[in-house]
Image (spheres, rainbow, N blue to C red):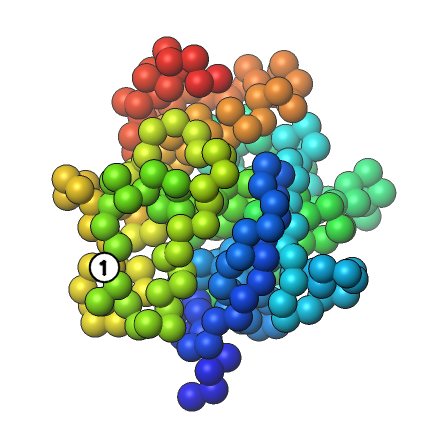
Amino acid sequence: MNTQDPVNTGEFRTTEEPLTGYISGVTFDRKEVQYSLIDGEPTFEGDIILDLLDEESDEPRPKGVVVTGHRWTNGIIPYEIDPALPNPNRVHGAIAHWEEFTIIRFVQRTAANASQHPNYVRFRPSGGCSSSIGMRGSGRQHINLASGCSLGNTIHEIGHTVGLWHEQSRADRNNWITVHTSHITASHAHNFNQHITDGDDVGPYDYASIMHYPKKAFSKDGQDTITTKGGEPIGQRTALSAGDIATVWHIYHKLVKGEQQMSMKFASGSTTPGATNWVKYSNTGIY
């Protein structure tokens, strides 16, 4: 097999030969990362698309600096849906879920309003599920969805587009989970590297997060690659958790208008996983 042929599916695509680059974001600068080149796109942790720039040029290069996205203006994400995308209802359902439980809003981009929305997301068919972190600010960016990417996968990928990283990449993750490298192919282990140690973590570690890897992510033998300290379940792809919702509020509540802040549905009255944590978040003043 070619070492750059992708293996695994969905959110967990990787290659046998990782490449090296640097990542720079809103609150941090120059972190070395390893990534896979999948369908011509530098892909990090299985489903995060990176913008690789040469350190002295604006031209894409195999090794360089990654500038991760910024926050979406006013918390509004303009979008298009590729007509060739199978099952567009999963996109409509995911958008409805985000609008019901968070202050993020979506507006469909059309020929009539295109000039008002130069930066936007296009949902398009692909071989896996993937997206960029935040607003790239360079025009169109993509959320890639294979036919097998579910409604929950779509909610997850929108999470990256909003600006969320994977939960298990938090700085404190070793206090909450154990990564079992013996069950991971050595060349795939870079997908578990702990990169995000820059103070971006919001709230307590959230096993219920829709942004958390499942327990068998990148497993080579069907055994668990991640276990939690108390046997808690991880990796659900059903709904945003209370912790996810609180994090999005923390990131965006100062950027959106008052009407938008008041229009969200509070998680304490929902069936969202982990919703009982919502009161804890609000009472501790994390907002």
The residue sitting at 40% across, 47% down in the picture is 169
Q: Where is residue 163 shown, x and y percent of the image?
A: 55, 41
Whether residue 278 is visible here, answered yes or no, is yes
Labels in figure, total? 1
Residue 201: give x, y in percent of width and height: 44, 34
**Left or right side of 143 for 191:** left
Query: At 43% across and 67% down in the image, what residue appears?
Result: 13
Q: Mark 1 — residue? A: 180
Q: How many neighbours does mark 1 have within 10 angstroms: few (below 14), some (14-19), or many (20 or more)?
A: some
Depicted 61 relative to depicted 22: above or below? below
Q: Residue at x 64, y 36 (%)?
A: 71
Quadrant in the picture for the N terminus: bottom left
Q: Could you say which is closer to the camera, residue 4 or residue 115?
A: 4
- The image quadrant of residue 193 is bottom left
| Image quarter of residue 83 | bottom right
Disc 1 marks a residue whose amino acid type is His
In this orientation, does residue 143 appear?
no
Q: Whole-percent x and y of residue 50? A: 59, 57
Residue 217 vs residue 96: left or right? left
Q: Position of residue 67 (x, y in %)?
A: 65, 50
Image vertical order of residue 117 relative to residue 102, above or below? below
Question: Which residue is found at the position 17% from the left and 42% from the top?
Answer: 229
Residue 247 placement, left or right of 229: right
Q: Secondary structure at mark 1?
A: loop
> Looking at this rendering, what residue extends furthest in the bottom direction?
1
